[in-house]
Image: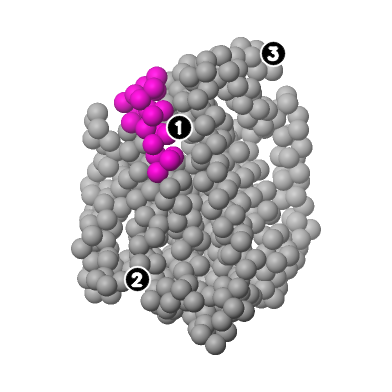
Amino acid sequence: MTLILILDLLAVTLLCQVAMVRGFERTLPVAAFLLIIFPNESQIQVPGLFDLTTQRIVVVALLLLYLVLGKAPGESKARDTLPLKYLFIVQIVWWALSSVNSVVVGVSVKTVLSQLLDFYLVYFIFAKSITRVETIHKILYAVVLAMFVCSMFGAVEAYRGWSVLSLFPPVPHRFNYGVDFDRGIRVQATFGHAILYGGALAMAIPMALYLMAVAKTTARKVFLWSAIVLMFLNIYKTASRGPWIAAILSVAPILLCGGKRMRRYVLVISLLTATVLIARPGVWESISNLYGETLNPDTAQGESYQWRYALYNAGFQHLNKDAGRAMWGYGPESFYYLGWKGEFQGHIVPFESCDSSFAAMMIETGYVGVLITVVLLMKAAYLTLRNFLRTPSPESHIYLLFLVNLGAFYFMMTNVAIFGWGQQSYMLWLVLAMSLVCPRLGVSKRARKEDPAHVAEFSPTLSYAGYASLQQR
């Protein structure tokens, strides 16, 4: 408890000091670092009410600072717009209706409030407060730095068997901790599970590659190379199939569509990876065996893979029996209270885990609820893709980064309950905020062609007034 109180005090003090001395916008990278670095175990439990995590204290402090210092008088109307706000409103309303019809109303209401205060509020503050591309770069550096620190913890965990989570009191958890009798120690650093940690690494590695391409100093390049190597080591040590695939799916588009520097870095990483696999054949053997066992339903890994399909089948069977449940679902966060049992590989087993965010949303918020969420997430990806296609190189590379980040997270949502809790969800909402506000900070390809005499070059200091004037033209 003492350690947690000290960490909370240090986090709030750091945010306040940066905001007072350097301005509110400079606190955003600091907040991003703090939101990712602290584990869920860093919390003070308030019985019957809520868990006061360090992240929630950071969000509350950030909100208060935003209300006092965040909004400058006379700022442009462009900053007042909130991307996708109507879809967010529809989703919130639907979650509220689903909560009213929940089998566990109290749990569902607290879950919706948690989504609003933990994640939507973060998205709102970041989307409203980012005024420069420079700020986005600093936020990306903060995320990479946080994952670099986690990777150092992960390396110690892998080779010394000591976890930083042992410093914190244990809390109720929806996942088991990092020992797997089939795969040994699976590093998780400060995250809730190895697969969640691997998903976050799959998003952070492309961030480091992008920052390498825009880095101006040798010191930054050395740090970023060190971070990339250490993060690749950690993602291997998670022994998680989903994050490995997500990392490949993230790096491949960079190799195909990234700039010369980014492609060169990916090729170097590929050569280093091939060298390791040749020099250490045991590494390739462990990877190959794990994927081979996935296709064998008689192994633990094969059962885990087949379990995802069983979840969807159970969801369809129960929802289709009741038109109301098909529409509203059973209520947010209700899955673990349903007590379902069903056939799985010839046996009747209880459904105690939900290894897919999409299956969970379908069961908990109904077909309409999951459709709303899918439309929201895909609309964000579509807008990012459109901006990537409309923006000339090298400015378009930042959109490519955000696109592969979203793709990695969406893919992981099919593999694990990754949405709506934990540090990896904060990463998602930070990426959403940055990707959707980035267009108002730069110049699109279409604007260049339509009015080249009045369009300023893409720069970190492009003002909102300039953006509004550009839109009027």
Q: Amino acid at mark 2?
A: Ser
Query: Residue 123 magenta-drawn?
Result: no
Q: Are marks 1 and 3 in contact (CB under 8 Å)?
A: no
Does residue 463 appear to the left or right of 242 in the view shown? left
Q: Residues within 10 Å of mark 1 (few under 14, many from 20)?
A: few
Task: Give the spatial CA distance, label 1 vs label 3.
Answer: 26 Å
Number of other residues with Cα within 10 Å of mark 2, as a class: few under 14, some 14 to 19, many 20 or more:
some
**Can you give x and y, in whole percent of width and height, for residue 105 in the image?**
34, 24
Quote the CA–CA distance across marks 2 and 1: 44 Å
Q: Is residue 355 left or right of residue 300?
A: left
The residue drawn where x is 68% and y is 53% is 249
Q: Is residue 237 visible?
A: no
Mark 2 and mark 3: span between their CA atoms?
63 Å
Pointer 2 and pointer 3: residues touching (CB < 8 Å)?
no
Q: Secondary structure at mark 2?
A: loop
Residue identified by numbered label 2: 76
What span is colored magenta in the figure? Answer: 89-109
Image point 71% across, 39% down: which residue? 290
The residue tagged 3 is 346
Which residue is tagged 1? 174
Which of disc 3 and disc 1 is earlier in sequence?
Answer: 1
Hey, which quadrant is residue 292 in on the image?
top right
Kind of residue indicated by mark 1: Arg
Say which of marks 2 and 1 sits in front: 2
The answer to which of marks 2 and 1 sits earlier in the sequence is: 2
**Magenta region includes residue 93:** yes
Of the numbered discs 2 and 3, the one sitting upstream in the chain is 2
Residue 397 lies in what quarter of the image? bottom right
Q: Is residue 321 above or below residue 55?
A: above
Towards the viewer: 127 or 14: 127
